[in-house]
Amino acid sequence: MTVRVRLAPSPTGTLHIGTARTALFNWLFAKKNAGKFLLRIEDTDKERSSPKFLENILEGLKWLNLDWDEQLTIQSSRIEEHKKAIKTLLKRGLAYRCYATDNELEEMRKSQKLQGKPPRYDNRCRDLNEAEEKKYISEGRSSVIRFRIDESQSIEWDDLIRGAMTWSGQDLGGDMVISRRTNNSEIGEPLYNLAVVIDDAAMEISHVIRGEDHIANTAKQILLYEALGLKTPKFAHTPLILNSEGKKLSKRDGVTSISDFKEMGYTSESLTNYMALLGWSIPEGMNERFTLQEASKLFSFNKVNKSGAKFDWDKLNWLNSQVIHELPPEKLFKSVEPLLIKNGWKIPSQKWGNDLSTLIGPSLVTFNDFLKEAKPFFEEPSLQEDGANQLQATGAKEAISALINELEENPWNGEDLNKAKDLIQNTFSKTKIKKGVIMKSLRAALLGNLKGPDLISTWGLLAQMSKDINRLKKCLD
Ligand code: GLU
């Protein structure tokens, strides 16, 4: 069997991490089985769908390198196919018009609630005779179309993640609406379960891989496949992503959109790596840091957990720092350069940028940390408490003045770092101030505090921007 899987997002919101993880599992399964990963945009909810969300979803998938095969399918362009299927069901007596008004349905639900029963449609229009139908139509009622659900049957499938699944026909809420309310001579807008079945069949989808929140839909969809004589695909229901309290991760938990993670300075490599770990137990001996290609060789649904996966920022941060630390300085700088330029910072040269990346790269967790660490190179740092104390310490001012004299006598362009060592040595020889004091005072003068990366390299980069002498002089004022 040729494996053909799909992601079917609705452009009613930005690309959520849950959808992206579903995309990833589909993509990995397709690659592992030399199959195809397709994309279908389910845009039939006109009110909530928007081109800006569509763009966000497509950009997010591209950024994550989850490239899809074949042409994108737009569900709204297939509406006539969906309606054709509804007509077939009507003709075969497997679907019927229901004239119950919204108010009547609301009354029905209220009374079910009073009796402590779960809400369900009571199939009241299932067997209307001609006279009854005529009466409803003459009353000016509109209708939805419902698909008959035989409540005595149980629906079974072998889920790739959950094994044998059984769903009772009684638990599907009564005969299912397959098209929206309209006048009685037309077919109203087809609804989700119907459209998905028609499209998945047309796209020859072999495996439907989606979140466990779709399990009840799967039961309904299997009935539609059977009623329409279509080949039922296999199903895999992936575990949900949970927040720290064990509830489904939602917008209320803060960052959930792929574009937000990107904005925060996460790499697509670490995000796909992390998402794969959300639910997939990697084979023994496999390192937790892996590439998409490595994962695609080993991925299997046998190793995907049934229970929800808790989102863990520490793990994501660890993976992100691994990915950033693996980047050669040139690549790292290329990734962050647009951020620096956006801040209005002028970069002296490409080499300078690469050297800065070598210096601060090892301390970064996200690309945005680069901005924090690079800031003192572009903007005058403010004097922190530890820096201020250092500059008050015995010998500090004297050391700085001596350094200024040295620099004025032997100007340094910041390139040859050995020269910096000579400057410090000369200062020590002339003033006899301890080298530790000289170095700490220099750091306080250049950066405003006593923390930070290697001092000599920092000084070199600042000297190349001609910012060192000024800062030394300023702290004497
Ligand atoms: N449009 C549905 C969603 O976004 C698709 C579900 C499915 O994969 O069938 O939830």
Image (cartoon, helix red, strand yellow):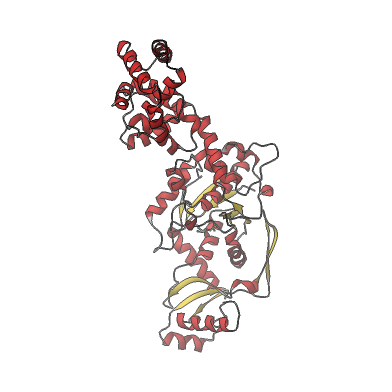
Residue in front for this viewpoint, 128 or 335: 335
Estimate the x, y position of residue 102 in percent, counting from the top left: 46, 79
Residue in front for this viewpoint, 276 or 206: 276
Estimate the x, y position of residue 359 in percent, counting from the top left: 45, 26
| Quadrant that contains the C terminus | top left
Q: Answer above or below: position of 316 versus 146.
A: above
Q: Answer above or below: position of 149 versus 17.
A: below
Residue 267 visible, this angle:
yes
Q: Answer above or below: position of 92 versus 419.
A: below
Considering every residue shown, the one lying at the far left of the view is 477
Estimate the x, y position of residue 218 in percent, counting from the top left: 60, 62
Does residue 185 appear to the left or right of 275 in the view shown? left
Q: Residue at x 61, y 36 (%)?
A: 294
Estimate the x, y position of residue 249 in percent, counting from the top left: 53, 56
Q: Residue at x 55, y 71 (%)?
A: 89
Q: Residue at x 56, y 46 (%)?
A: 275
